[in-house]
Amino acid sequence: MKILFVNFNLGATAGINNGIAAMSAVLKERGHQVELIFLAESLGYDFDLQRLKKDIVRINPDVLGLSVMEPQFKYAVEFCRYLTTYYSGVVVVGGPYPTMDPETVLSVEGVNAVCVGEGEEAICELMDAVYKGENINSIKNLWVKSSDGSIARNKLRPFIDLRKVPPEDKNLFDLNKILSLKNYQLEVMASRGCAFKCTYCINGSYVALCRKLSDGAAKFKDYIRVKDAQIILTEIKNVITLHPEVKKIAFIDDNFATNLRFLEDFCLLYKEDIGLPFG
């Protein structure tokens, strides 16, 4: 089975989409083929509907996954409407904005489903269901729109255990271009979640949404998770082995210093295995 991710990064700084990188890793682990179209002016791929059509027809994916932030949603709307004229596969949309406003995203012509929250397990179940020709209406973390316009608003599964996920597939991205734009700094996420509830940030609202939609308890303490140290180190080594020009690692966690016990152990391993400056 083949999935094509389209990342809408228009009008923004180009960088690795950690959500897509994480989903690509679990999909490839289960034998699926993953392709990526990264829309970003700085990477030479503008919003060109005819070019997109040509590439999508050539790739011919079974499922098309869109990653959308709110400022780029207007492009996704136009894209999805035109997509209906030549693509008949499943279109699923995810990201922070679709998670917080799935109703609006589902109202877009051409969108079949919205991934609410974390997508690693949901996207794999979706791919399996499409392969078997099964109904996708009951997959947790997906809100699915039927042909009659009705919506299956499925519950959310528990926050994923980051110690059990494979290293992110950062090499899915055009790192030759992205790293040069970042002055050869590689961005890495060691954890998810934050203990604080700053009003300008999504964390508080996101956990409140998860509490409302989850089958079980969705607590802040469960939301704050750290990957296994070896997973993080492997993610980095998978890139710097192919791109020795990397000069520095940037940990872009919401709060990298949440777990001090982890940090003490990790820094010793990092110094021995990686040794690059980090921020």
Image (spheres, rainbow, N blue to C red):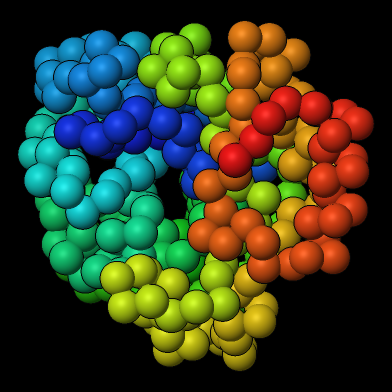
28 to 195, vertically: above or below: above
Query: Which residue is drawn at the image coordinates 72% and 60% (left, top)?
Result: 226
- Quick one: 232 or 68, which is closer to the camera? 232
Residue 18 shown left or right of residue 229 in the figure: left
- Quick one: 175 or 100, which is closer to the camera? 175
Percent from the top left, x then y, of residue 1?
56, 31
Query: Which residue is drawn at the image coordinates 52% and 42% (left, top)?
Result: 18
Query: Which residue is drawn at the image coordinates 21% and 20% (left, top)?
Result: 41
Residue 186 shown left or right of residue 181 in the figure: right
Residue 8 seen in render = yes
206 to 40, vertically: above or below: below
Residue 127 seen in render = no
- The image quadrant where one finds the C terminus is top right
Residue 111 shown left or right of residue 231 in the figure: left
66 to 275, vertically: above or below: below
- Quick one: 278 or 56, which is closer to the camera? 278
- Quadrant assignment, res 7: top left
97 to 153, vertically: above or below: above
- Quadrant assignment, res 98: bottom left
Query: Which residue is drawn at the image coordinates 79% and 42% (left, top)?
Result: 231
Residue 206 shown left or right of residue 223 in the figure: left
- Quadrant assignment, res 197: bottom left
Percent from the top left, x then y, of residue 57?
29, 17
